[in-house]
Amino acid sequence: MLDGETRTFLTRHAGHTPEDEALWLAALTHGSTGDKRNYERLEFLGDRVLGLAIAEWLYRESDEPEGRLSQRLNALVSRATCAGIAREIGLGPHMRLGKQARDDGGEDSDNILGDVMEAMIGACFTERGFPAARDMVRKLWADTLAGKTGKRKHPKSALQEWAAGSRRRMPEYRLVDRAGPDHALRFTVEVHVHNVGSAQATAGSKQEAETLAAEEFMRKFA
């Protein structure tokens, strides 16, 4: 069942207190835990609900032509955007990951964060229907939809958006070195963008090293 902090977190961001706790627990659960009930099916559903909620908002609030609407829709529902919003609300610590996935930086993975964000939307839709899920999306995406986030982007999200905007390949992260005793491991990560360059950083966790490497890359090349 959900612990108190996670229940409070979900209540704040879903807009209501979770009723089916097993449903919401599944939305937060990665397959690496070995649990048969994980977020995959809810992510499939949430992805479609998110797309509809954003498309409806764009249609009602903008008179732009179809091509521009599609372009903006794709950006607003992208993995990078979903992961960025997940980071802003502090989703990572509430996700249930297997030890290996967590050690590999799963708590800060764009793929996992984006998937769980969509699974939460799927859970809201399943429990309360489309109006509640739409309200959840509009609340979480409010600053992004308005085009004024008002917050510093997470370095990995900023780098990914910079690469997309510059028509470059997506950044690739590589673990270069892992050293030190188990209680004080140091991870060195390199981030590379094809035909631009690379940057490295070292930190006490793989995800922190990736973040610092992205910051260093942006400082050098963006």
Image: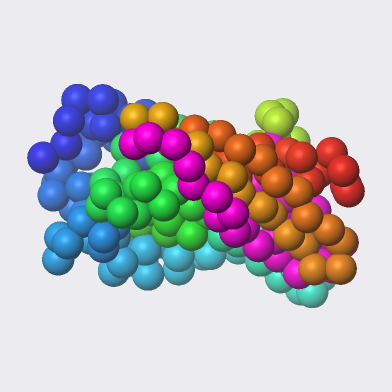
Is residue 67 shown to the viewer in this render?
A: yes
Quadrant that contains the N terminus = top left
- Position of 178 with respect to 221 (left or right) is left
| Colour pattern of the rendering | rainbow
Q: Residue at position x 44%, y 48% from top?
A: 105
| Left or right: 127 in relation to 147 | left
Task: Count numbered badges in the picture.
Answer: 0
Q: Residue furthest bottom?
A: 67
At x 26%, y 25%, the residue is 5
Q: Quadrant of residue 195?
A: bottom right
Q: Position of residue 77 (x, y in %)?
A: 59, 60
Q: Residue at x 69, y 29 (%)?
A: 151
Note whether 90 is above or below 221 in the view shown.
above
Magenta span contains residue 148: no
**Looking at the image, residue 125 lies above or below residue 6:** below
Residue at x 50%, y 37% (from the top left corner):
186
Q: Say which quarter of the image contains residue 7.
A: top left
Q: Which residues are magenta?
A: 153-182
Q: Is residue 155 visible?
A: no
Q: Looking at the picture, tell me which residue is in the foreground, 165 or 204.
A: 204
Give the percent coordinates (x, y) of residue 78: 60, 61
In percent of width and height, residue 44 lies at: 37, 70
User: x, y (%) of residue 141?
Assistant: 58, 43
Q: Residue furthest front?
A: 180
Q: Residue 173: which quarter of the image?
A: bottom right
Check if residue 175 falls in the magenta segment: yes
Task: From the viewer's perspective, tell me whether residue 178 is left or right of residue 127.
Answer: right
